[in-house]
Image (cartoon, helix red, strand yellow):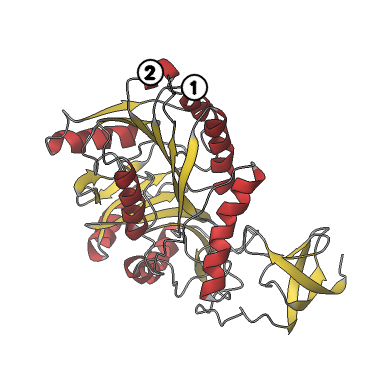
Amino acid sequence: MDEILELEIRRLGASGDGIADGPIFVAGALPGERVRVRRIGKERARLLDVLAGARARVAAPCAHFGMCGGCAVQHLADDAYAQWKVSLVETALAARGLAATVEPLVRIAPGTRRRAELAARRTPEGVLLGFHEAASAAIVDLRACHVLVPALVRLLPALRGLLGDMLRPGETCDLHASAADNGIDLLVTGRSPDPRRRTALADFAAANGIVRIAWRRNAGDTPEIVALHEAPLVSVGGIPVALPPGAFLQAAREAEAALSAEVATALAKAKRVVDLYAGLGTFSFPLAARVHAVEGDGAASAAMLAAARGTGRAGRITCEARDLARRPLLPEELDDYDAAIFDPPREGASEQARHLAASAIPLVVGVSCNPATFARDARTLVDGGYELRRVVPVDQFVWTGHVELVAVFAKPKKRR
């Protein structure tokens, strides 16, 4: 299909694509624009020209924008951008019949993302290293990045040199890079390095501020530590926690602080809290209450417990490794607490929300990176008698269609 069309863009979609009647999705187009496109599928078209631009169109700061799939809306003016992010939450709630005032967007600056999922491929011209193109397996060779912390950007040239020695012609690998407080932690997924090169890996790590390099053959395999200078540490609520290889880490420290502050304020009067999907203790450690932290990743739960013990908090914080998708806490297990936190992965917490809704917990704070699954779970809580009292969006993933949020639910006391 090689059809050339002129379209009027009506609105901006959840992923940052302009949407024309049809619908037809056009990456890089903005509402109010008339554009010339090449149709590439039933519902998709590639932008060729902007015939009449929107007032909200601005120059993108990054030379990779439009090709790199890491950012979707660098070309959108700041005020319109903030309104769009808020609208993503409002639209998701409205789709579930939920009426709630969404607070203004909590802004996070560019250049603060401390973790990245990168891809690499060795080609005859050298190593390509960066993010994928949007909806493509092609790799954009990053020479600059306006969202990552400078330490990760500075590492890119050295990583290309390393992977040029490690990868065979045509071979690919994936890299999970995190900027810990004491250096960079690197997890590589791909063919294991030649044993003779492990000394070179240790030397590379020492020369480039990398505290640990771990390697695994496939995603889901147990990583093997191939270079270790010291354990990567991250401060979680002021508590140093050793980061397990590949563990989930809030993408930006500033966003983590904003989310934690909202949770702590909502739970300031709570005495006994259950923290569901607790991760490394992002929300548990800052609280003054007694907390039972439940997390499905055993390594993360163990790291949190070790940090609690090492800082004298083991009496206040208890940890349980438990897959909440398969074994959610039941109402009788929840009823001993006067507040709950839930911060599930993108797929949400449908089963756990059902049991929360049936519990007697008077106060629930939800944290989510997916407004759609959050709205589904919020509907379950509201149907169970909770009131949705506060929703705060946080712009953790700048210039993307992702938005974090914190929401407060309260179950009114029954009148006698």
Q: Earlier in the sequence, mark 2 or mark 1?
A: 2
Q: Find residue 10 and report its horizontal and vertical position in percent.
A: 75, 68
Q: Residues within 10 Å of mark 2 (few under 14, many from 20)?
A: few
Mark 1 lies on a secondary structure that is: loop
Which residue is found at the position 44% from the left and 54% from the top? 175
Residue at image position (46%, 23%) is 328
Camera-nearest residue between 345 and 366? 366
Say which residue label 2 marks. 333
In depth, the one of 241 and 348 nearer the eye is 348
Foreground tag (2 vs 1): 1
* Quarter the C terminus occupies: top left
* Vertical comparison of 347 with 160: above or below: above
**Residue 401 spot, x, y in % from top left:** 57, 59
Q: Is 237 situated left or right of 346 in this image?
A: left
- Residue 67, by quadrant, is bottom right
Question: Cβ–Cβ below 8 Å for labels 2 and 1?
Answer: no
| Image quarter hosting the N terminus | bottom right
Give the residue number, with chain letter if any, for mark 1.
Answer: 358
Residue 167 visible, this angle: yes
